[in-house]
Amino acid sequence: MLRNAFEPWHLLLIIAVLVLLFGSKKLPDMARGLGRSMRILKSEAKSLKDDRPDGTPHADSAARH
């Protein structure tokens, strides 16, 4: 049903709308901010996953060692 939901012209239309709404000068700053936010979110999620209150290792990390 949703196979091939996004075609190349969909992406072009989204980019055109973003340029019209925000202007070409704001888009690189917005993309940079989004990238920073994603890196922070990824590092925080990893630290939450790695922090165990009782100090026991995860089942998947024990298999790696």
Image (cartoon, grey):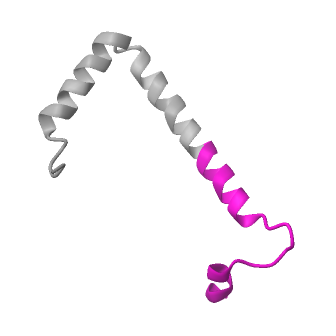
In the image, 2 versus 4, the foreground residue is: 2
Q: Residue at x 16, y 52 (%)?
A: 3
Q: Residue at x 62, y 80 (%)?
A: 60
**What residue span does the magenta drawing correspond to?**
40-65
In the image, 63 versus 2, the foreground residue is: 2
Where on the picture, by quarter, is residue 40?
top right
Coordinates of residue 29 in the picture (x, y in percent): 48, 23
Q: Residue at x 65, y 58 (%)?
A: 46
Taking the image as shown, residue 42 lies to the left or right of residue 13, namely right
Coordinates of residue 9 in the picture (x, y in percent): 12, 33
**Is 48 included in the stretch rendered in magenta?**
yes
Where on the picture, by quarter, is residue 63?
bottom right
Coordinates of residue 30 in the picture (x, y in percent): 47, 24
Taking the image as shown, residue 18 lies to the left or right of residue 60, namely left
Taking the image as shown, residue 17 lies to the left or right of residue 58, namely left
Where on the picture, by quarter, is residue 37?
top right
Taking the image as shown, residue 11 lies to the left or right of residue 28, namely left
Residue 47 lies, with reference to residue 62, above or below; the image says above
Does any portion of residue 23 appear in the rendered image?
Answer: no
